[in-house]
Image (cartoon, helix red, strand yellow):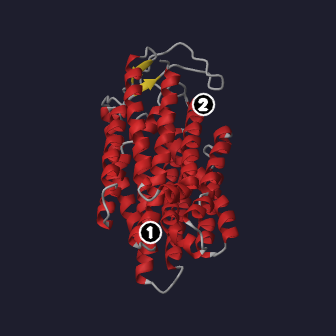
Amino acid sequence: MRAAQVKTGCFILEGLNSFATTFYFYYLYFFMQQQFGFGDKANLVLAAFNGLDYMFAVWWGGRFAQRAGCFTALKIGFVIMIAALAVGTQLDSATGHVAVMLATTLGMGFTWPPLEALVSEGENPVRLQQSIGLYNVVWAGLGALAYFIGGAMLEKLGLKSLFVVPMAILVVQLALTIWLEREAKGASQLELVRPMAEVGRVTPCAPELVGHGDGAHGVTRPTTIRTGIPLELNPRPIARARAFLRMAWLTNPFAYIAINTLVAVMPGVAGRLGLSTTLAGFCCSVWCFARLAAFFALWFWPGWHYRFRWLLGSYLALVVSFAVILVVPSLAVLVASQLVFGVGIGLIYYSSLFYSMDVGETKAEHGGIHEAMIGLGNFAGPAVGAAALHFLPHSAHSGAAAVGGLLLCGLGGLLGIWRKTKT
């Protein structure tokens, strides 16, 4: 099997993973609302625990993949998630389902960092833009589809489908991973990656796809052996690149502060607007498709690379649209604001992943840090929102105001890093 075909298999794994995890985690809040009467505050607390769990799971999962290999990490992650969801089909207590969620999140932490590393390894700076662009489009597209049709699936197939559907997809992923690992080991165009860690120790990450193509036409040139030296020097100054990496690692968790807060309170928003679970899936997934459109644009236009005004503009769009979505009780405004929200978070996420893969050689570990920042945001936003609703229960918009204030703190941090970079 050729290197390009193995990478295609990795993109298939990524798409399946996005559909399965988006369906489960986004509709878990609807499940908890319908089964156990969870309101906004309870769902925000649930989301905060999930984010905290994910932050540590992906950080450790990325480091594990860097040491033990990406396919090994993937297999462990899929097995953990399958087992947790299987248990979930047999439970009918809120506490039990919280435990299932935490176990599923732990397994998911072993999947995203190695997937990011597998599609990025062996790429020069030009082809890295293409690989990450395709990676973002695949996961965002399948995730948007899962959110869009997930409400209808839940209503038509029953609440147990929340566990059965992702579990079936994960079984397929596990089988595909085992097959890809075997093919990668036997392929003449694959070589075991041994990226040089910062401490100078050589550690295995994953089978590297080092057959070089011209990108647009998929023509594979003769394979070269990687020695730890970049395939092609990136023209950007390394100090500037690291500054943008820091800014991206700062803004990405704040983007997920907004995302995870919105996802957790969407059942409440849908209830206030009189939407069924099916209609909630249709109307509340608009931002996912806007993010997908942003990924397409950013994939084919690299002019945003290392341009501060684009990162700043996207963050400002995020803050304003987040507040409007939660405060203005109108379906038309909800849909329109999601378009702005999706574009803003699209550039922020793309920046974090691109700079993480562009700066440094330990891609699985950097992918783990990138995902850990997402986990930090997933924890902080819902935690602040839940605390505000607890201490100010009579203020309908206290949670939105508190999270909005937190997002403004992120804006201050972004401007602070930029000022330090320019001086």
Q: Nearer the viewer, mark 2 or mark 1?
A: 1
Tell me whether the residue at label 2 lies in contact with that at label 1, contact meaning CB atoms closer than 8 angstroms: no
Q: Quadrant of residue 219?
A: top right
Q: In this rendering, does residue 44 appear at all?
A: no
Residue at screen point 56% across, 42% down: 136
Side (left or right) of 414 relative to 283: left
Residue 126 image label:
2
Query: Whole-percent x and y of residue 232?
Result: 54, 25
Residue 121, above or below 378: above
Q: Residues within 10 Å of mark 1 (few under 14, many from 20)?
A: few
The three-letter amino acid code for the residue at tag 1 is: Gln
Query: Whole-percent x and y of residue 4?
Result: 53, 23
Q: Residue furthest bottom?
A: 394
Residue 34 image label:
1
The three-letter amino acid code for the residue at tag 2 is: Val
Disc 2 secondary structure class: helix
Q: In this rendering, does residue 257 appear at all?
A: yes
Query: Whole-percent x and y of residue 302?
Result: 65, 40
Q: Earlier in the sequence, mark 2 or mark 1?
A: 1
168 or 183: nearer the viewer: 168
Residue at screen point 34% across, 42% down: 77
83 or 373: nearer the viewer: 83
Q: Quadrant of residue 321?
A: bottom right
Residue 163, above or below 385: above
